[in-house]
Amino acid sequence: MAKVVKAIRGMNDILPDEAHTWHFFEHTVQKWLNMYGYRNIRTPIVEQTDLFVRSIGEVTDIVEKEMYSFVDHLNNDSLALRPEGTASCVRAVIEHNLLYGGPQRLYYSGPMFRHERPQKGRYRQFHQVGVEALGFSGPDIDAELIIMCARLWKMLGITGLRLEIGTLGSAESRAVHRARLIKYFEQHVKQIDEDANRRLHTNPLRILDSKNPEMQSIIAGAPKLIDDLDESSRIHFETLQHILREQCVDFEVNPRLVRGLDYYNRTVFEWITDKLGAQGAVCAGGRYDGLIEQVGGKSAPACGFAMGVERLLALMQQCGSEITHPVPDIYIAYQGELAMDYAWKAAEFLRNENCYVILHCGGGSFKSQMKKADASGARYALVIGDDEAKAQEVSLKPLREAIDQARVSLNVVSELIST
Ligand code: ATP
Ligand code: MG
């Protein structure tokens, strides 16, 4: 036998049973995005590596260690599989001049790629839904993004999520803070780890995001950005909190909330669960007023977030969310030559009437066909023998209720399904 070819580690197949849940999720998300007036943007999965280096930042985990970048040997281009969606979205908005028509509420969804150690809730190909509001500068849109998340959790039946918010201030206040941080970590240079040492002068803010337990007490003592905040960032942050309180969205201010991407300023936020072990972040985002200019566009403010679909689906399961998915209305079983022609006719007729129909294929006894009908989850079986076919009727058998089989016409069947 030939050697079995397997999927790539950390990249999952989504099988039909599971795909039901994905469909329910996607359907709900679609409805939710429509409610808030966000429009879809679809960008390629591969971009120039430079786009991500310039946007996410050179000294970040994603760019340093997690990005699938490669040389396209056909033309020597340096390309990368997208590790996230914001950079691509911003690239497309600039390229097609979308902000010319005013601010844009956009969303995207699809696979992202990061070369991480695969574990529960952490994959090398995973999926995100990302929402981006470009061209808006006020805290109102920051609030909208957060409030809409709270609604989605309800729609998905997810409970117990914690919202943490923080602010990174303006570029100027971050520069002041940065200098204070460098000074602080220089004073503790003997106690900080190799990663922190390397980032000390390039990206000291990221040291605050270290997962190393031995670093935590030093991090706890570091200066807080909130104390260096500029006046307009402070007002922005307070207005955001005011709107959230008015809307009864609970939150905690986390002065240490640093995102793993360099492009954020002012508002940052994260929705976290304790129900998924170490992989607790299900949705994260913030404001990125400098990014559009940084990747070559005309300066414009923006804010957005991305959620991890696999983690949300796992959480829905934990929360026992009720997942509804379409089951077939009808399974058609038939036997005999006349019956075959009438079965085909019946199936297409009922589909014209918007019924979900599975037509049995592969022959076999009525008994074995009825077993398949039952397993399909269909509400009714239509049994067609040559007798029924001659009479242009079907035997209708309810599969989920204890009601007797009855001979009826197709019109009766379609009426029954539509009520
Ligand atoms: P983490 O701290 O868990 O590594 P992150 O800060 O790198 O997350 P973001 O870049 O903010 O994550 O991406 C937004 C969301 O995408 C995360 O909150 C998470 O739900 C999901 N996500 C990120 N990386 C992965 C991954 N490798 N596998 C599955 N989901 C992921
Ligand atoms: Mg990460």
Image: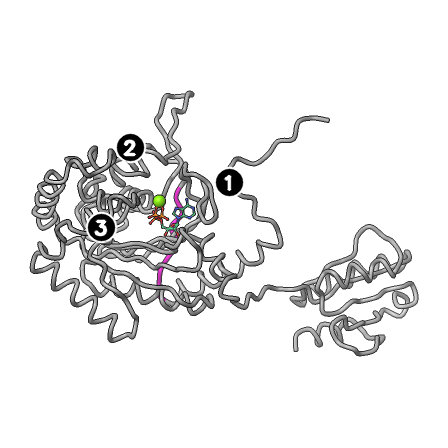
In percent of width and height, residue 345 lies at 78, 61
On screen, residue 64 versus residue 8, left or right, reads: left
For mark 2, does the 10 Å Cα neighbourhood hold few (<14), some (14 to 19), or many (20 or more) residues?
Answer: some
User: Residue flagged by tag 1: what amino acid is it?
Assistant: Met
Q: Which residue is drawn at 51% across and 40% down?
A: 11
Q: Which of marks 2 and 3 is nearer the N terminus?
A: 2
Residue bearing mark 1:
11
Q: What stretch is highlighted in magenta?
A: 36-43
In percent of width and height, residue 153 lies at 41, 66
Q: Is mark 3 within 8 Å of ligand 1?
A: no
Q: Residue at x 40, y 51 (%)?
A: 278
**What is the C-alpha distance between the residues marked 2 and 3?**
18 Å
User: Residue flagged by tag 2: what amino acid is it?
Assistant: Asp
Is 368 one of the magenta-colored residues?
A: no
Q: Do the residues labelled 2 and 1 touch (CB within 8 Å)?
A: no
14 relative to 20, above or below: above
- Is residue 24 in sight in this rendering? yes
For mark 3, does the 10 Å Cα neighbourhood hold few (<14), some (14 to 19), or many (20 or more) residues?
Answer: many
Secondary structure mostly taken by the magenta-highlighted segment of the chain: loop
Of helix, strand and loop, which one carries label 1? Answer: loop
413 relative to 190, above or below: below
In percent of width and height, residue 137 lies at 18, 58
- Is residue 58 in sight in this rendering? no
Residue bearing mark 2:
50
Q: Earlier in the sequence, mark 2 or mark 1?
A: 1
Residue bearing mark 3:
288
